[in-house]
Image (tube, grey):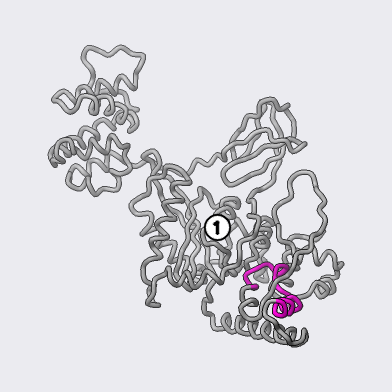
Amino acid sequence: MLTLPQQQYIRLMREVEGCTISEIARNRNISWRTAKKYADKNDWNIDFGPRIRQKPVMEPFQEVVDTWLAEDRQLPRKQRHTAARIYQRLKNEYGFTGSDRTVRAYVQKRREQMAVEDAQAYHRLEHPGGEAQVDFCTVQVSKDAKLMEYKLLVASFPYSNAAFVYPVPRENQECFLEGLKRLFEKMGGVPTRIWFDNLSAAVVSVEKDGQRKCTDAFLRFCAHYRFDAVFCNPNKGNEKGHVENKCGYSRRNWCVPIPVFTDQETFARELTEIEQADRQRPHYAKGVTIEELWHQETPKLLALPDKPYEVLRLDSAKVNGYGEIRFDNASFFLPGVQPDADVLLKVFWNRIEVYDSDYQKLAQFPRPYTGKTMDIPWREVLQSLQKKPRSVNHSQFVRLLPLVIQQFVLARDAGGAPNEIKLRLGWLSEWLTCYRLDEIAQALEKEWLADGHTGAFCDRMIHRLYTIRNPQKTLPEVLPTARELPAA
């Protein structure tokens, strides 16, 4: 069996260089049948399960004169027209009376001219439509009143200045390929050429001659979607400067103030709405909107394959004496599975599926992504707001507080008076010396929302917080102040 780089090279000889099957077979010293198998292979998904032998199916090739030839460049080669088929269609549909030889000569001439036009475009170092640059950037999001690090996979098109973004929790291989697939689906097609950094999710190593040794999964993905992957020189991010700038633009304009993260789907949908609105602005140099330029660029994208690529990694594990397997530095319990049993793993970007040796599914677990989180210094933030109480309406940190605390701090029940806001910020800062935000929110729901704000409100809050922290204890006759209570 040929290695994946050999298989991909055969596909490139067919797709890019336009070699025939016989030429490929002679050049690579392989059989015609083997050359045919990899040159016209469409489905590069990993085989999983018992092998099922399929009979080869011959599908028609489609091509058309001029317009047809241009459209054919967006389709897989085995779905393109041959000169013979063009002649048949011209004869049957348009009453063409010329000879087969005339059509063949014209088709050959037009193909050569189109190849020269493409070569000239790349020689001028311009960005023809349909080419993209891709990179990751890191943003902070708020989850449960804490900051969490998240990744944005950004694809930008230098020709139109359009950008597409998909959020993922990590920069690993599964997240990278799944993010690319989702970006292609949002674009409605596949860029013909994509520029990347030498990211570890795609590149194993950079050889001495500058060649990249890519991961098998990335090679399969490239072959399935038929795009040409180009890698920048090490430490030369300026070679894909458009997406570098777009990463900064998206971080500054789309993620400020800090987004509140509820779940993956909601965050992705919000970013899609933002990027669609952003395309309505004028291009910085061309005098028309980005959306208009994007409509010009869309026909140059490659067609999406009929069958989406299933992004996964196959792995294996052994069940330990506790009936658990270890993966991603976490333990997963498999009830009913014997210790020392070998199991198969299908690792997706967001889940792990476990199978026995007969390919029967045993269990499914979410991947143990925890995210890099850090606590917000809430007491310092609140003390700063106390000095300028009118600024609470504009503070991005107030947006990150639990809803009941937001309402309490904004003091709209008291007309938003600055003195009242200042007083409440002081109380909240004092409570935070001993209690967590979730405990304070729970106490406010009981005391402030239930009974309103009275003179004894602060004392009742201290009693309520003590009860939440110590549910089994009897309240003392004289409750200590917040500063006298044990720290959280």
- Residue lying at 47% horizontally and 55% vertically, measured from the top left: 152
**Residue beneath disc 1:** 185
Q: How many marks?
A: 1
- Residue lying at 21% horizontally and 15% vertically, measured from the top left: 478
Where is 467 relative to 163, above or below? above
Q: Where in the figure is residue 339, as x and y percent of width and height?
A: 72, 27
Query: Is 265 situated left or right of 102 in this image?
Result: left
Pick the residue in front: 25 or 272. Answer: 272
- Report helix, strand or loop for mark 1: helix
Neighbour class for label 1 at 10 Å: few (<14), some, many (≥20)? few
- Residue lying at 78% horizontally and 74% vertically, measured from the top left: 20
Quadrant, the N terminus: bottom right
Q: Where in the figure is residue 170, as x and y percent of width and height?
A: 53, 49
State the predominant SS element of the stretch in magenta.
helix
Quadrant of residue 454 within the rendered picture: top left
Say if the magenta span includes residue 435.
Answer: no
Pick the residue in front: 49 or 370. Answer: 49
Query: Is 448 situated left or right of 106 in this image?
Result: left
Q: Amino acid at mark 1?
A: Glu
Q: Which residues are magenta?
A: 72-92
Pick the residue in front: 129 or 334. Answer: 129
- Residue lying at 72% horizontally and 65% vertically, measured from the top left: 8
Q: Where in the figure is residue 435, as x and y percent of width and height?
A: 31, 29
Where is 271 relative to 229, above or below? above
Say if the magenta span includes residue 85.
Answer: yes
Quadrant, the C terminus: top left
